[in-house]
Image: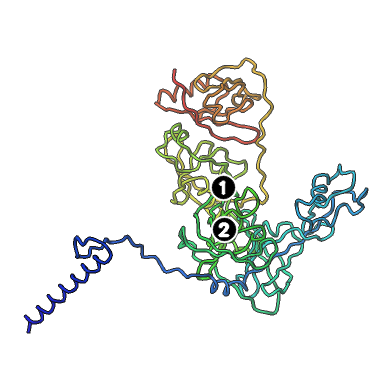
Amino acid sequence: MKLSTSLDAGRQRLATRAAAIAIAAVLGVTAISVTPVFAEAVRINARAQVTGFADVVEKVTPAVVSVRVKSRVESTGGGEGFFPFGGQGFDDLPDDHPLKRFFRDFGGENNPFGGGPDHPRRKGPRGEGRLQPTSQGSGFFISEDGFIVTNNHVVDGGAEFTVVLDNGDELDAKLIGRDERTDLAVLKVDASRSFTYVAFADDSKIRVGDWVVAVGNPFGLGGTVTAGIVSARGRDIGAGPYDDFIQIDAAVNRGNSGGPAFNQSGEVVGVNTAIFSPSGGNVGIAFAIPASLAKDVVNKLMTGGTIARGWLGVAIQPVDQDIAESLGLQGTKGALVSDPQDNSPAKAAGIKSGDVITEVDGKAIESPKDLSRLIGDLTPGKEIELTLMRGGKPEKLKLTLGKLPEGDKIASAEAPAPAKPAEAIKLSALGLSVEAAEGGKGLKVTAVEDGSKAEENGIAVGDVILSVNAAEVADAKAAESAVAEAEKAGRKAVLLQVERGEQSRFVALPLAKG
């Protein structure tokens, strides 16, 4: 029985090979070998993606609203002259229309024909003046009882707010709170009804390449849907100290601000906030506030209306390789203190210019952004321990955080007018000529050598050098001595503290040989 079975199997294998040879002959292929050999393809066990977004869109669209803002404004034009209406009414004309260009180019106080339509002046939410539509954006419900998330720049300066639902209903809303530093705001609709709302996602699970769907109100068209992928994470676009944007390539245009970017589960992964565009239109580079940051800020705004952030009170800058070399540091991590502010927790605790903050309560500080975010997330009044590098050695300081002042001013960075050298002394190793500054504090730069490292690093005539390698300098001899000590210690660069106007910064200059 076994033999018969074996013979039958042998006949079957011969028949299969014969059939393969016959097929090869018909196709004009020389049958070198009839044994099939398959190369193992590289495969990625990725999750199957849906072929469309209709289910997600159908689920989330009722939660997305259009936000219309009116502000109290007054016209800066006189409204008298050849056109007694001052050009008002031309706002609806196309931007390239001759009449609109005329009033845009010639409107204002010097316009002989009266004020133009492009010169209203906002008075703020409590000011006088007539109400006029000033901005339009998007938002989305995050609760059944009518809390709405949008961007701060959408509602900024607004006196009245209206939200338009997906079904066309228009409802009045009030501003609950806003945060300029993260560009987030919360509105509230009071109505005897329940609203469809959406939840924030865990954005830590979002990966580059994941699908996203943006829903909003671009150009006032009403609910519009676009789709794309996550292009990058952790983008810093220079908008503020809390930049940590998700970059997406879904089409985001004017009016999408404040709208949500959804994942395929219908959860909000980010709040659309900004675009990169030379033309003002979509080019496939948009930025969204991550859900984790938005959720935290929104929860605080809903309960208190404001955000109380911790305040250290230092001006800081990155540690680059030259600065690290001049300070004798092993790496470029940390935040370099360029100026502790007066009457600040930092000043009271003894933090000095030139200190490099490397840890806060044991958490490593990689960059100035890290320090700003970490301190801003802490509660005013909290006691913290800082680890810093001073003179090449680690030190620890304890201090109590203050409250970040509202509307804090940025000091002017304008350079004083250049002064003619008077008994200037040349510091060849630095490529500078200096003289004693007024009041005996530091050395004023009177000349900068063309093509020198000082010029490359932005040092200009009129700047004041306060210290060299943390040693205060009141005359050129003190500067020369500090440079000589750096050379003796084998340093390849020296660290200058340079003051311009009311701001100071550190600049590392490589030492010239010979």
Q: Earlier in the sequence, mark 1 or mark 2?
A: 2
Q: Secondary structure at mark 2?
A: strand
- As drawn, the label of residue 478 is none
Q: Position of residue 445 (x, y in %)?
A: 60, 24
Q: How is the image coloured?
A: rainbow
Instruction: Say above or below: 332 vs 210.
Output: above
Tell me residue 152's x, y (percent). 66, 58
Q: Position of residue 496 (x, y in %)?
A: 53, 30
Residues packed near mark 2 inside 10 Å, few (<14), some (14 to 19) or many (20 plus): many
Q: Residue furthest top?
A: 423
Q: 280 or 265, which lies in front?
A: 280
Of the two numbered discs 1 and 2 in the rendering, the one whose residue sits closer to the viewer: 2
Residue at (81% x, 61% y) in the render: 131
Tell me the quadrant of the picture where the C terminus can be found: top left
Mark 1 residue element: loop
- Which quadrant holds residue 223? bottom right
* Residue at point 56%, 56% (across, down): 379
Q: Check disc 1 and report the residue beneath it.
A: 312
Disc 1 crowd rating (10 Å Cα; few below 14, some 14-19, many 20+) is many
Dot 1 amino acid type? Leu
For the N terminus, the image quarter is: bottom left
Residue 272, position in %: x, y? 60, 59
Which image quadrant for residue 467? top right
Q: Gap between marks 1 and 2, in whole Å?
A: 25 Å
Name the residue that disc number 2 marks.
289
Total marks in image: 2
Q: Is 88 placed left or right of 468 in the picture?
A: right
Which amino acid lies under the numbered mark 2 shown in the image of this protein? Ile
